[in-house]
Structures are given as C-alpha cells and as structure tokens.
Image (tube, rainbow, N blue to C red):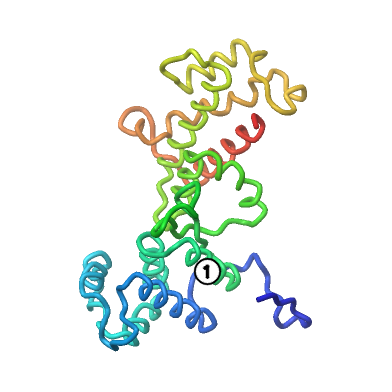
Amino acid sequence: MKFKPVTKKYIFDSNELIRDFPSYLETPVATWIQSVLVNSDIWSPSDYHAIDEVFLNDLDLHFREKVSFPRDHRHFLEFVLSDADRTINVIAVCLQNYARPREAEEMEYILATGGSAYAVMYKVKKPETYDRGIADIVERVPEVVRDSSKKILDKYILVQEAWHSCYSRNPDYAKTVGKCTDALEGLFKDRYFQKDSSPSLGRFIKSFKTTPTKLAFHGDTLVDPKSVLTDLAINFIPIRGHHTSGTGRAPTKEEAVFVLYYTIFVIQLHS
C-alpha cells in the first residue's frame, strides 16, 4: 500500500528506530507469525489447540523461559508479544527455519515501515531459488549505507557473511574481521598474485608497500604512494578471530565496523 502523509502528524523521523513492538506492530507481526507457521504445517487453523508439540518443545528448550510456551493459539501469540526480546527471537526462528522468500520480504516491509531497529537479511545469494529458512534478523543500518553496499554484498558471500556477523542479534566481531580479511586476500590474489598458492594478507600488503606501482584501482592517481590504500589493512591481522590465542586480541564493535566498510570500499575501488 502506498501512503504519502498530508499532515505532520504522520511524518516520522526515519532515524528514530525502535527495539520494542508497540501496539501498531503487534497485529501485523502476530498475523505474520501465524501465517508462516500455518504454511509450514506447524499451526492448524482448524484446531484451536493444534500447534505442533515438537515445535513448542524446541522453543522451550532453546528459549529457557520460566514458563513453557502456551499450547493454544491466542495465548501463544500473547506470550510471544509480551516481551520484545522474545518477539524478535521468535521472528528469527521463523525466518531461519520456515519463512519463504516472499514471507521474509513481508516481514522486512513490516519492520521497515514500522520504524524497527531490526531488519531482515538473506543468508544466500539467490533467495528466490530456495524454499524456506534463508533469512535472519540483523541490526538496521542507515539506508544510504545499506544501499551503497548492496552490490558488493550480493556478489561477495564472504562480505555478506561478515555483514551478518557484525549486525546480527548476537554479533561476532572477530568473525566479521576474519571474513573481511579472507575477502581481501581473495581479491588481492585474484587481481595481483594469481600464481600465489598460499594467499597471505600480510605478505600481500608488504609487497604493495615495497612496490606500490603494481596496485591499480579507481582514482589511484590521487594517491601517492598507492599503497596508502592497503597499508591500513596490516592492522586487521592481529584482531582476526584465530589470532586471539597468541599476540592478537578480539576486535571491538567500532573496529569491526571499520574493517567491514573498508573492505567494501576497497572492493568497490577494484570493481
């Protein structure tokens, strides 16, 4: 449905994102959850008490609530919607396991239109070729950032996985940095070191520093030496996940976000 407000009352600040589920979101979310579970044969629309017991037992085991998830339809939805953390995680369960691409798009419309701080993100390159369970919940980022990154995310699965690790409900910043450094290693190997049988980001960066003229990217005439672009990445190596047992450490959120955006930028310059 298209809607262009004609008074200020219904013009909302797009930067004021919410993490709860106020009344205007409850019915759309409840209807969506019911529809996904009905289409997955978990929820029987003809039997008031017929929600699949295996599904409910799995929820009880994974969520570890003080009380079990209710077994009848109405109380089940009331329980899901009574706590914002519970709500977004039940939505995540549906997206990760049962929702079809069209249903994932419907949830993203609900969240985006409702001003939610959460967004739906596909976990695969071509979601239309899959049946179910190919999406998840991530943190919503500014639209201009998301749109500028979309082409790279669609093309490079490692960067997409890094993005998801950075903005998921349970972020893994070391994994974000690790996936990004793997993506940079692959980019540099394919572009500059095709004969190298064991790609190493650190070795590639040192080679660029020694011979910066080998670098070629959009706008490289503005950078002298060209290796200024790649020198920054040497600091990523100690904070990638598998180095934390030695002299490395886990990255902070700010560092992981920087590495992610830097990686997207470098790939864009080479596209």
How far across and down, in percent of the image, does residue 166 sit?
Answer: 47, 48
Q: Which residue, as the protein is rendered here, is positioned at the far top?
A: 210
Q: Residue 227 appears at what percent x and percent y?
A: 63, 20
Residue drawn at x 39%, y 78% as measured from the top left: 34
Question: From the viewer's perspective, is residue 70 above or below residue 210?
Answer: below
Density class for disc 1 (Cα within 10 Å; few <14, some 14-19, many ≥20) is some
Seen from the viewer's position, the closer of residues 1 and 258 is 1
SS for callout 1:
helix
Q: Could you tell me how many numbered marks the image carries?
A: 1
Q: Residue at x 46, y 38 (%)?
A: 177
The image shows residue 85 at horizontal and vertical percentages of 39, 70
**Image quadrant assignment for residue 1:** bottom right
Q: Is residue 68 left or right of residue 139?
A: left
Asked if 245 appears above or below 133 in the picture, the reply is above
**Residue carrying label 1:** 106
In the rendering, at what x and y percent does residue 211 appear? 62, 11
The image quarter containing residue 114 is: bottom right
17 or 184, which is in the foreground?
A: 184
The residue at 60%/48% (across/down) is 150
In the image, what residue type sits under mark 1? Answer: Glu
- The correct choice, above or below, for 62 with respect to 256 in the image is below
Q: Nearer the viewer, residue 256 or 68?
A: 68
Taking depth in this image into account, of 144 and 2 the one nearest to the observer is 2
The answer to which quarter of the image holds residue 200 is top left
The quarter of the image holding the C terminus is top right
Tell whether 123 sits left or right of 155.
left
Taking 85 as reference, is 216 left or right?
right
